[in-house]
């Protein structure tokens, strides 16, 4: 088999964002574009020759083509062995699970998460390290630096590899093992949760659940775990056949994009529990009967109740949340006497804390929750955690949340997204707000007294690496906050995210609509940042 060295020229735009390199499929289809990035990964990693890598993706359009190219490049670059999901499928948390379980060197995950898929939509690729987690910035920056000076890539000349059936084959000197994408992950879930109790609940006859896979990767995982292993009736699952274009949808599990599920859970005869996951299976939305659990509250509630679940029965070491995530988890950590960390947005910042045993649970306001069982956020894990809690407490979702608020107080919370706005306007907003920060410090905004106003800077407590410019935060003396940042996962224009939070200790005032409870902060956010002026938008495109 001949191995080729193909001359190439750098592309200027291969810097990974919050979660890998995400671009339009058309961008990836340019000659040499994917190859350049993959070669930059291989060239940036020392000691990769002879090692085992995991490869798989969310099954979106271009997944199959990209995987064939990656396998041929891996063979030409001296990789020893590749574990690849059947048909090229692996959810993001399942890929993390496989990397860890088989002690692999790392893995390539092909996904643009919840972004729409298809020939005119998005594709993405990221590298995960031996701990199963997204590569830290040190590595993503090295990959980017390499992509700026790349001159050639290596690839073997070979026909396509059959990925339809589990088994082993060889490509040049490299072994390829096609694995069941679901089994290892499902086994891990069975170790963490009380499947007997959950099975009893689902089979009790008076518990009804709906899980929406949104035509994306979690369909087969939900079928194996919820139906085959836990006995839920098949009709509990929606949209479980993964499609290359996610059926034209936007598999982002929130109140806007998971509308069909939300309508079912808010109907008169609503089920007891509803959940959805995103394109690559790492996000989750949790609903009760006519009740929505914010992801920030979910993290706090899982933290407070962790001991009720077998995998965390010994208690948890600590909890970490991304900076814009509400401070609800902080209150639980304080009450439990455990550590609480605040990190920049993006799961890669949790890796060191998890590896060092500093934290057990992590979460982001963006429908991401997870633990030290893998090094990615994990959608079905969160669903099973909630089902386990419902099974052992006999409480409803709404009751569990109300109990929580009564004990710890409620952090009213909302995120307003202004998607696909003009980049210049968005940058101007961030810049002028940044310049105003010194004036805001110690002053007032409306009735709120400013406690701090800064651009979030994070120093990793384990390796002391520093990440600057992680979002503008204005915090008030009563614990309320507003946070502004630009998305690092979009592929078109800019997306402004505004995060709002207010604490309410009084149980009699904990049952307002979040938008109403936050109305004053919403108004002040527009006033201080000039959102309408800079974006030209009267209202956010998505509210969660
Ligand atoms: C968004 C979320 C962030 C999440 C990231 C990847 O990033 O805000 O919390 O980690 O997506 O999630 P950004 O930069 O667009 O705000 V996923 O499910 O796309 O892998
Ligand atoms: Co995702």
Image (tube, rainbow, N blue to C red):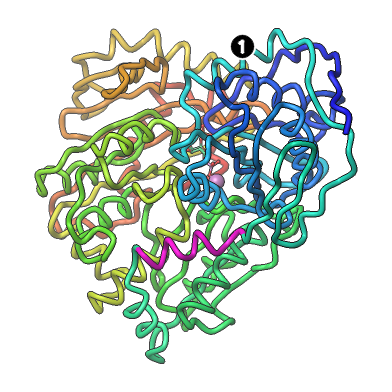
Stretch of the chain drawn in magenta: 181-191
Does the magenta segment cover residue 519? no
Q: Residue at x 17, y 48 (%)?
A: 332
Q: Is residue 521 above or below residue 386?
A: above
Q: Residue at x 19, y 24 (%)?
A: 449
The local secondary structure at tag 1 comes to helix
Q: How many marks?
A: 1
Q: Is residue 531 visible?
A: yes
In the image shown, does 95 or 240 lie closer to the viewer? Answer: 95
Q: Is residue 383 above or below residue 336?
A: below
In the image shown, does 304 or 412 lie closer to the viewer? Answer: 304
Question: Residue 148 in the image: x percent, y percent?
Answer: 69, 10
Question: Residue 419 in the image: x percent, y percent?
Answer: 60, 35
Question: Residue 47 in the image: x percent, y percent?
Answer: 55, 23
Q: Quadrant of the N terminus?
A: top right
**Dominant SS in magenta:** helix
Q: Quadrant of residue 68?
A: top right
325 with respect to 96 (left or right)? left
In the image shown, does 127 or 73 lie closer to the viewer? Answer: 73
Q: Is residue 422 visible?
A: no
465 with respect to 90 (left or right)? left
The outermost residue toward the bottom is 205
Mark 1 highlights which residue?
A: 145
The outermost residue toward the front is 173
Question: Residue 531 in the image: x percent, y percent?
Answer: 49, 26
Does the magenta segment cover residue 189? yes
In the image shown, does 150 or 472 lie closer to the viewer? Answer: 150
Crowding around mark 1 (Cα neighbors within 10 Å: few <14, some 14 to 19, many 20+) is some
Q: Residue at x 35, y 85 (%)?
A: 200
383 with respect to 76 (left or right)? left
Q: Quadrant of residue 523?
A: top left
């Amino acid at each position: 088999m001949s191995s080729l060295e193909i001359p190439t020229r750098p592309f200027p735009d291969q810097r990974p964002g919050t979660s890998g390199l995400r671009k339009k499929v058309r961008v990836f289809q340019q000659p040499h574009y994917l190859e350049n990035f993959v070669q930059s990964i291989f060239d940036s990693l020392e000691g990769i020759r002879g090692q085992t890598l995991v490869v798989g993706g969310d099954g979106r359009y271009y997944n199959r083509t990209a995987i064939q190219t990656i396998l041929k490049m891996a063979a030409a670059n001296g990789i020893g062995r590749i574990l690849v999901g059947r048909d090229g499928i692996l959810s993001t948390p399942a890929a993390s699970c496989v990397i860890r379980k088989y002690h692999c060197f790392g893995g390539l995950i092909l996904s643009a998460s919840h972004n729409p898929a298809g020939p005119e939509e998005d594709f993405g690729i990221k590298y995960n390290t031996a701990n199963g987690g997204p590569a830290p910035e040190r590595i993503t920056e090295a990959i980017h630096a390499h992509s700026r000076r790349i001159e050639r890539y290596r690839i073997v000349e070979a026909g396509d590899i059959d990925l339809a059936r589990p088994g082993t084959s060889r490509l040049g000197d490299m072994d390829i093992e096609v694995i069941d994408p679901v089994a290892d992950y499902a086994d891990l879930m069975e170790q963490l949760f009380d499947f007997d109790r959950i099975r009893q609940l689902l089979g009790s006859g008076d518990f009804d659940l709906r899980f929406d896979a949104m035509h994306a990767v979690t369909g087969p995982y939900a079928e194996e775990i919820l139906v085959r292993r836990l006995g839920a009736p098949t009709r509990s699952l929606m949209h479980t056949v993964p499609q290359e274009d996610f059926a034209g949808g936007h598999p982002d599990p929130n109140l806007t994009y998971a509308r069909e599920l939300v309508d079912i859970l808010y109907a008169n005869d609503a089920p007891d529990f509803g959940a959805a996951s995103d394109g690559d299976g790492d996000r989750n939305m949790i609903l009760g009967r006519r009740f929505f659990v914010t992801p920030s509250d979910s993290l706090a509630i899982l933290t407070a109740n962790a001991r009720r679940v077998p995998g965390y029965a010994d208690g948890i070491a600590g909890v970490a949340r991304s900076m814009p995530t509400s401070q609800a988890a902080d209150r639980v950590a304080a009450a439990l006497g455990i550590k609480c960390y605040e990190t920049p947005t993006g799961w890669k910042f949790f890796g060191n804390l998890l590896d060092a045993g500093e934290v057990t649970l992590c979460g982001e306001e963006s429908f991401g929750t997870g633990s030290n069982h893998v090094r990615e956020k994990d959608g079905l894990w969160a669903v099973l955690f909630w089902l386990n809690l419902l099974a052992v407490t006999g409480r409803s979702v709404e009751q569990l949340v109300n109990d929580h608020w009564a004990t710890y107080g409620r952090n009213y919370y909302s995120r307003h997204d202004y998607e696909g706005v003009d980049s210049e306007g968005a940058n101007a907003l961030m810049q002028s707000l940044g310049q105003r920060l010194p004036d805001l410090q110690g002053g007032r905004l409306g009735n709120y007294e400013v406690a701090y106003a800064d651009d979030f800077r994070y120093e990793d407590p384990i390796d002391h690496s520093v990440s600057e410019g992680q979002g503008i935060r204005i915090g008030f003396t009563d614990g309320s906050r507003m946070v502004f940042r630009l998305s690092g996962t979009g592929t078109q224009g800019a997306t402004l995210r505004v995060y709002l939070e207010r604490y309410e200790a009084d149980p009699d005032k904990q049952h307002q609509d979040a938008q109403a409870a936050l109305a004053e902060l919403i108004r002040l956010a527009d006033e201080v940042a000039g959102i309408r002026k800079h974006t030209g938008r009267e209202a956010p495109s998505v509210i969660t």
